[in-house]
Amino acid sequence: MKIVGEYSFNNGEKEVAKRYGRLLHEVEQVVKTIKATQHKTKQSREKTMPGRILYSPRSINKAFKEEFESRGWRSVRVPCVYSTGHYLGSYRGKSKSKGAFREMDFVKERLGIEVQFGKYAFMVYNVCAKMTIFRNLGHIDCGIEIVPVKAFADEMSTGVSYFEQFVWDLEHRGIADIDIPVLISGIDD
């Protein structure tokens, strides 16, 4: 696979290159190592493309996991203990958060990476909420979000979001004072 697009959110490109140049090169090597054709294994059952063979996001994610972990990247999982103090009256204490957690796909030397082949909302959540949370918890300083470009997403099940849509929304959202530097990498087969 290859990186065919980059978007610098909150000065992400400059900050990641300056602080994590060696790790950025490692990320680029991981992307190059994955052979997309090996993951075109999912037979569509959708009405709009019955029987068509598509890329499997699950299989691609597994390949990214294997490649990153072989280079010493690890997922970071933090437990969530939810407050019930905002419930009203007799509802207090009825909700349980046992087993709840947040997880970042890969972290190494305070650089966080998310690989996203899902719905649009997950991309926005990763950059505009999760990465800030993981920074606030002391796990990362900068992030990289790896997402498909439209041409690649069109070869997956419907509903997979893509780089161009994500960039447009981030540009129109703007940057808040809590946002961390994130490099958005658009990939294709």
Image (cartoon, grey):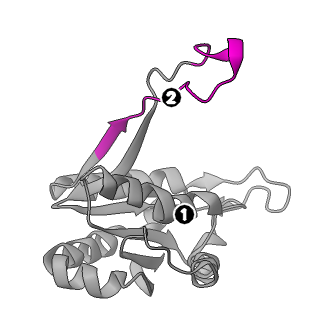
Asked if the stretch drawn in magenta spans residue 84, the answer is: yes
Quadrant in which the N terminus is drawn:
bottom left
Q: What residue sits 43% from the left and 29% below the top?
A: 81
Which numbered disc, 2 or 1, marks the residue closer to the eye?
A: 2
Residue nearest the viewer, comparing 43 with 17? 17
Tell me where residue 92 sits by quadrant: top right
Q: What residue sits 53% from the left and 56% below the top?
A: 57
Task: Identify the element where label 1 is drawn.
Answer: helix
Above or below residue 137? Residue 120 is: below
Residue at the spot of label 2: 83
**Numbered range of the magenta stretch:** 76-95
In the rendering, at what x and y percent does residue 71 appear?
Answer: 16, 59
Q: CA distance from mark 2 to mark 1?
A: 26 Å
In the rendering, at what x and y percent does residue 32 appear?
Answer: 31, 76
In the rendering, at what x and y percent does residue 67 appear?
Answer: 26, 58
Q: Residues within 10 Å of mark 2 (few under 14, many from 20)?
A: few
Residue nearest the viewer, comparing 148 with 78? 78
Position of 65 with respect to 39 (left or right) is: left
Name the amino acid type tagged 1: Met
Q: Residues within 10 Å of mark 1 (few under 14, many from 20)?
A: many
Count of numbered circles on the image: 2
Does residue 182 appear anywhere in the picture? yes
Residue at the spot of label 1: 123
Tell me where residue 72 sits by quadrant: bottom left
Name the amino acid type tagged 2: Ser
Does residue 119 appear anywhere in the picture? no
Q: Main secondary structure of the magenta part?
A: loop
In the rendering, at what x and y percent does residue 90 appear?
Answer: 69, 11
Asked if the stretch drawn in magenta spans residue 110, the answer is: no
Task: Identify the element where label 2 is drawn.
Answer: loop
Q: Earlier in the sequence, mark 2 or mark 1?
A: 2
